[in-house]
Amino acid sequence: MEQGTGFFSFLSENLSNFWGYTGIATATAGHIIMILFGLAFIYMAIKKNWEPMLLLPIGFGIIVGNIPHLASLKIGIYEEGSVLNILYHGVKNGWYPPLIFLGIGAMTDFSTLISNPKLLLVGAAAQLGIFAAYTTALAVGFEPNQAGAIGIIGGADGPTAIFLSSRLAPDMMGAIAIAAYSYMALVPVIQPPVMKLFTTHKERLIRMKPPRVVSSNEKILFPIVGFLLTAFIVPSGLPLLGMLFFGNLLKESGVTRRLAETARGPIIDICTILIGLTVGASTQATNFLNIRSLGIFGLGAASFIVATIGGVLFVKFFNLFLKEGNKMNPLIGNAGVSAVPDSARVSEEVGRHYDPTNHLLMHAMGPNVAGVIGSAVAAGVLLGFLS
């Protein structure tokens, strides 16, 4: 009888210990909220087709990062030496963003920008949101380095946001990255009302001249000259700018096709998977669910909206100095943010809503790719005087 009692006592103790190790026993309301948040990301990726390449890995990563477990198991993203922690080093130390920029450069055609250099100014004007958010974040009490990391959300460039926040505010990187990628996915929702609000019906009907044909020599020279100009002005942006222009040179040189295909294919796909999964996993409820994260999301939204307004209004201002027939359609101003190519597609869709025969996509790609360069330069500027 004593033997049976001892066995049941042993079994009960083991079951109790096992229960203590389960996620059910250690779950909190915060974990459940974050898991629901991750499921919402997956829903938007699959059902709404909003940036699925980004939102699906991030959404699943949020779920992975919020499965409750004991710290003694050393499997979480913040437990040194765990698998997730090792993969997260690519985010924490800024390894993945330059590799993604290499792939972006290898898949980007700068022809429209080369044929119409003034579109570069539109991309630069859209960076207004970054510095507006920076000053606002300072005003509401964030430290200068934190304000700089928050401001970059306005560029709608996830890799740049991760790169800069890893240097300036690593403790806020999860919230900043999630905000940046969220607003990239919401480009088709956020930008059209802003574009319509700040343009007239007449302006939306403006037809732009077709861009001139760009020679192969111009395409080859552009990444070399572009890199030298930007890198000498903002050396702190070297990791992003160097990889962006190098990737484009691989594409345009005509002699490194395999390397260009590798950069814009396997490399960028692998890095996107790893960066999405680990950034999502870094948003553990204990670190993410707080007032500061809400503030980051609010400032990021304001930054993104101001960036869109800045691009649109700059085109309207620039048109004051252009002759009739050479004017630009202000609807391409929104594309100055660095959400390639979604913001350019929004320009096309809004423009065709008012005139189905007016195609703005090829024109919008100019400020769109200029925005990629602009966000990297802005990150370099902030990193230069804040680090």
Image (cartoon, rainbow, N blue to C red):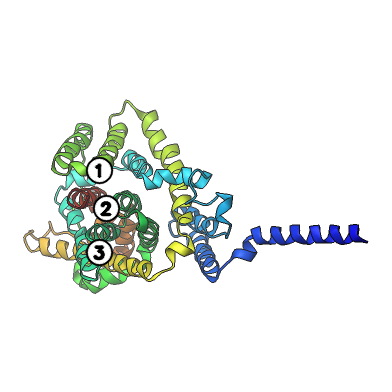
In this picture, is 137 found above or below 243?
below
Secondary structure beneath label 1: loop
Q: Nearer the viewer, mark 1 or mark 3?
A: 3
Label 2 – label 3 distance at C-alpha: 12 Å
Label 2 – label 1 distance at C-alpha: 10 Å
Q: Decide which of tag 1 and tag 3 comes sooner along the chain.
A: 1
Is residue 142 visible in the rendered image? The answer is yes
Q: Residue at x 38, y 36 (%)?
A: 263
Across and down, in percent, residue 143 comes to: 24, 62
Secondary structure beneath label 3: helix
Q: Decide which of tag 2 and tag 1 comes sooner along the chain.
A: 1
Across and down, in percent, residue 280 comes to: 46, 56
Find disc 2 in the rendering and name its residue. 368
Find disc 3 in the rendering and name its residue. 308
Q: Decide which of tag 2 and tag 3 comes sooner along the chain.
A: 3
Across and down, in percent, residue 155 comes to: 27, 57
- Tag shown at residue 110: 1
Specify the amino acid type for callout 1. Answer: Phe
Label 1 – label 3 distance at C-alpha: 21 Å
* Farthest residue, direction right: 1
